[in-house]
Amino acid sequence: MASTPYLFTTSIISHAEMMIAMNSLSDRFQLAAPHFQSQEGDSCQAARSLSEIDLDLGLLRQAAAEMSLDVNKLTITNTPKALLMADMDATMIRGESLDELATLVGIGPEIAQITARAMAGELDFEAALTARLSLLEGENASLLDKVIAMTVITCGAAALVATMRSQGHPACLVSGGCTFLTRHVAAELGFSGHHANEIEIKNGVLSGGFLPPLLDKSAKARILAELCLQHDITAHDVIAVGDGANDLEMLTAAGLGIAFEGKPALRAQISDQLSFSDLSALLYLQSYDRADFITP
């Protein structure tokens, strides 16, 4: 029987601490001695280990989580992909952009509550977007520039996009958020394209609505299919990453779909998950060597 490979990653603990954790897991689950792929000091530590049996991933993941480690089972789908499809809010950037905008005008908790319910799959996305934007009606559009200035790029995002582009593989940012920010994030990180919802602005203020068409979970999957046709590839050749229920269709359509710091509703349906690792772990999940990483 062939051995089963598992990938362990973390951005929480050091290389030395990961070595101790891996030794503990190896003893407990009868894993082979780990092969470390990362370098000491890297933002994301990574190691592979083999098992002679097909382990219960849930039990292994629970034990690894106690040591701040992610673990994913490697299969034939873990190969370099030809296209990256990435969500923006709480994935490529930290936080939710509409929540940040709401905080600037003093209604952060009200909008954050709607956002959380939408990302958990408890609210229809269009209804949630409409409700949030309506609360921002009449606010000065100059606030959008302040949100851009506050935006924090997620650790590992730049290396992920740059490394894939260095191999000739484009990246597309696709978000249920808004174009004023996807435009900025796409340019900063080197995405070849971006898609999002357009906030309507009238006479320099937010109208409280958006301009159609709506970009929701179905639209994300549709864009993935369109880009596959454009680049003459199949969905198997796509890696997709996101954190919320709005990303589910895109992640399930992709050959490799990753729930990154995913909401419970998403983690329940997506097997490949990252909770303790930065976005450069997506390169290890595609079987890139550390020597291939490009760090802008």
Image (cartoon, rainbow, N blue to C red):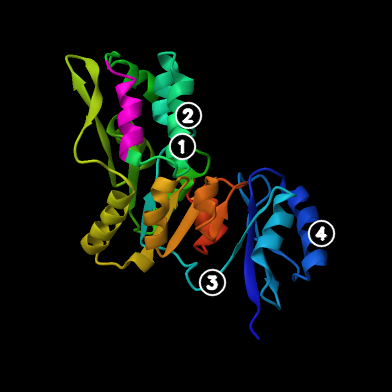
Image coords of residue 204 (percent x, y): 21, 14
Count of marks, rendered view: 4
Marks 4 and 2: in contact by CB < 8 Å? no
The residue under label 1 is 117
Distance from the alpha carbon under mark 3 to that under mark 4: 24 Å
The crowd level at tag 1 (other Cα within 10 Å; few <14, some 14-19, many 20+) is some
Q: Nearer the viewer, mark 2 or mark 4?
A: 2
Marks 1 and 2: in contact by CB < 8 Å? yes
The residue under label 2 is 113
Image coords of residue 70 (percent x, y): 64, 54
Image coords of residue 219 (percent x, y): 28, 50
Q: Residue at x 74, y 52 (%)?
A: 18
- Can residue 257 be seen at all in this image of the molecule? yes
Three-letter code, disc 4? Ser
> Which span of residues is magenta-colored?
126-137
The residue under label 4 is 24
The residue under label 3 is 75
Image coords of residue 93 (percent x, y): 45, 36
